[in-house]
């Protein structure tokens, strides 16, 4: 059986250019073949999105909320089908599928509540002062408005929560933007199930046809064509540094450059402060093992580097952690490309001067050629600071343990780091004031700082920040999780001197939208 792209309310044509999904746990290939979209289909999807842009922008908060809630219900109703399809395409266990389905529906409802309340538009009002001297002041009112069509690239490691109807799409729809989704080749069947639900919800909610399209194809052809199309006004991406940077560069070279919000590379360093006893160190080792191997280490918040104090406590941490990682069973990664990159990353790290391999990764790649074993490597602060390659992300269940001697070591290390999604501190809260200088530096390096907590597990809420300085993201001012992510796909518009009847409800004198406003 052959499947094709969803171009608005229509299906793409069958072509001889197609691909199949492969189960990374078993190596079994799906009977379904997925046709790669033609150039004309990509152009059609962009034109439909362009045609829908003004209609989407005109939707009320209540209309957008109704669509988002309807879609959440439809996706929840697919969970049993998703369990079958997603597990066969990704090797992920059923609890992960059900959990990610719940998170996806929760995000949609979270944005529904946000746009229904209306406060997110940041309405600002400065009334006219015609008698002001030496010059009169005009009436000025501003609020956030949608940027227009958005292209979203599905993430390989989150087939639901960062994919077709995941956070990028949900926040773009909430802002009032049409969305064109580029499906990931590793889980096309999962994408199609959710994509069909989106089309049904778009129809049922009365949204314009171009509110959504789902495109199958290669990133270098279809993806580049989407980013380069003049109708597209912003891009959301979660993936590798190479992929995100390529899209960013492409968008910057357009005749009309557009923003690319790419979440890319992060080693999520953990700093263990001195003064903790062996018992506490052993507890940290146990929690760290669970965090580092969660989902075969395929989380963007996976803790890749741990800095620990030299001495008895540090030695206990290392011994306990090594023992636990040796006992960790290998697990399938999401596809062969990720598994290959993991092996190459470990080899490069092990080849650095001063690095010792404490736990080598298993050579057994499983029936699908994608299994990966946990690995632990070690070095000291001096060697780490002398080799910038040690900070490169190794995406998978591995950890580099780095010993240090002093607070000065930690500050130099923190100052040498690239931008990160997270940075974690473990220590005694009563003595944290001694390390204020370290915190000052880490604040400039990461989007989320944690104390005595592990970075994996991202709470979806209003205050969370899932972002950070480059190369964690291409725009450190943004977040790809939480209600703040809607701001990526909106821009401020000011209305000067307009009669009240011509203003958006959010800016009218009587405040018919009943929202909180900055009213001078």
Image (cartoon, helix red, strand yellow):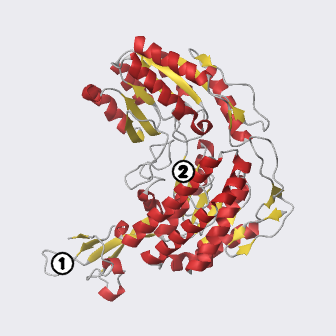
Q: Which quarter of the figure is the N terminus placed in?
A: bottom right
Q: Left or right: where does residue 246 sit relative to residue 386?
A: right
Residue 207 in view:
no
Q: Circle 1 is placed at which residue position?
A: 136
Q: Nearer the viewer, mark 2 or mark 1?
A: 2
Residue 454 image offset from top left, x and y in percent: 45, 35
Say which quarter of the image contains residue 519: bottom left
Q: Which mark is residue 489?
A: none
Residue 115 image offset from top left, x and y in percent: 42, 69
Identify the mark nearer the N-term, 2 or 1: 1
**Circle 2 crowding by C-alpha within 10 Å: few under 14, some 14–19, many from 20:** many
**Circle 1 crowding by C-alpha within 10 Å: few under 14, some 14–19, many from 20:** few
Q: Nearer the viewer, residue 247 or 207?
A: 207
Instruction: Give the residue at x 63% y 62%.
Output: 181
Distance from the alpha carbon under mark 2 to that under mark 1? 44 Å
Q: Nearer the viewer, residue 136 or 434?
A: 434
Q: Residue furthest top?
A: 312
Instruction: Give the residue at x 27% y 70%.
Output: 517
Q: Residue furthest right?
A: 16
Q: Left or right: where does residue 500 sit relative to residue 235?
A: left
Residue 160 image offset from top left, x and y in percent: 60, 55
Q: Secondary structure at mark 2?
A: strand
Q: Nearer the viewer, residue 3 or 83?
A: 83
Q: Circle 2 is placed at which residue position?
A: 262
Height in image: 251 above or below 116?
A: above
């Amino acid at each position: 059986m052959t499947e094709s792209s969803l171009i608005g309310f229509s299906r793409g044509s069958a072509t001889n250019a197609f691909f199949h999904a492969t189960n990374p746990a078993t190596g079994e290939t799906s009977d379904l073949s997925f046709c790669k979209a033609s150039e004309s289909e990509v152009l059609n999807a962009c034109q439909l999105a362009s045609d829908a842009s003004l209609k989407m922008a005109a939707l009320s908060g209540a209309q957008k909320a109704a669509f988002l809630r309807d879609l959440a219900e439809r996706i929840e109703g697919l969970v049993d089908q998703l369990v079958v399809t997603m597990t066969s395409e990704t090797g992920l266990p059923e609890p992960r599928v059900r959990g990610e389905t719940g998170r996806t529906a929760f995000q949609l409802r979270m944005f529904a509540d946000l746009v229904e309340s209306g406060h997110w538009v940041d309405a600002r009002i400065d009334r006219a002062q015609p008698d002001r001297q030496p010059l009169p002041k005009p009436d000025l009112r501003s609020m956030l408005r949608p940027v227009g069509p958005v292209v979203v690239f599905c993430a390989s490691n989150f087939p639901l929560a960062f994919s077709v109807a995941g956070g990028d799409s949900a926040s773009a729809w909430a802002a009032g933007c049409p969305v064109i989704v580029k499906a990931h080749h590793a889980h096309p069947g999962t994408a199609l199930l959710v994509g069909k639900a989106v089309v049904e919800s778009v129809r049922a909610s009365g949204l314009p046809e171009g509110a959504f399209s789902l495109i199958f194809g290669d990133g270098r052809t279809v993806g580049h064509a989407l980013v380069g199309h003049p109708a597209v006004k912003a891009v959301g991406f979660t993936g590798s540094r190479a992929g995100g940077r390529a899209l960013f560069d492409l968008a910057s070279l357009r005749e009309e450059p557009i923003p690319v919000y790419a979440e890319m590379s992060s080693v999520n360093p953990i700093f263990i402060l001195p003064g903790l006893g062996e018992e506490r160190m052993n507890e940290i080792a146990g929690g760290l093992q669970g965090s580092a191997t969660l989902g075969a280490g395929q989380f963007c918040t996976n803790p890749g580097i741990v800095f620990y104090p030299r001495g008895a406590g540090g030695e206990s941490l290392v011994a306990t952690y090594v023992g636990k990682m040796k006992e960790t069973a290998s697990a399938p990664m999401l596809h062969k490309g990720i598994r290959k990159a993991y092996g190459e990353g470990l080899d490069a790290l092990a080849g650095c001067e001063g690095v010792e391999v404490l736990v080598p990764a298993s050579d057994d790649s499983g029936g699908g050629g994608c299994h990966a074993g946990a690995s632990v490597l070690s070095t000291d602060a001096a060697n780490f600071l002398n080799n910038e390659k040690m900070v490169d992300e190794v995406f998978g269940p591995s950890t580099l343990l780095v010993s240090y001697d002093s607070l000065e070591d930690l500050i130099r290390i923190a100052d040498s780091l690239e931008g990160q999604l997270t940075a974690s501190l473990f220590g005694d809260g009563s003595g944290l004031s001694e390390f204020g200088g370290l915190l000052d530096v880490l604040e400039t390096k990461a989007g989320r700082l944690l104390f005595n907590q592990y970075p994996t597990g991202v709470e979806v809420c209003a205050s969370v920040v899932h972002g950070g300085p480059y190369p964690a993201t291409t725009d450190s001012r943004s977040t790809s999780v939480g209600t703040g992510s809607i701001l990526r796909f909106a821009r401020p518009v000011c209305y000067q001197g307009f009669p009240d009847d011509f203003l958006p409800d959010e800016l009218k004198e009587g405040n018919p939208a009943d929202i909180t406003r900055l009213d001078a």
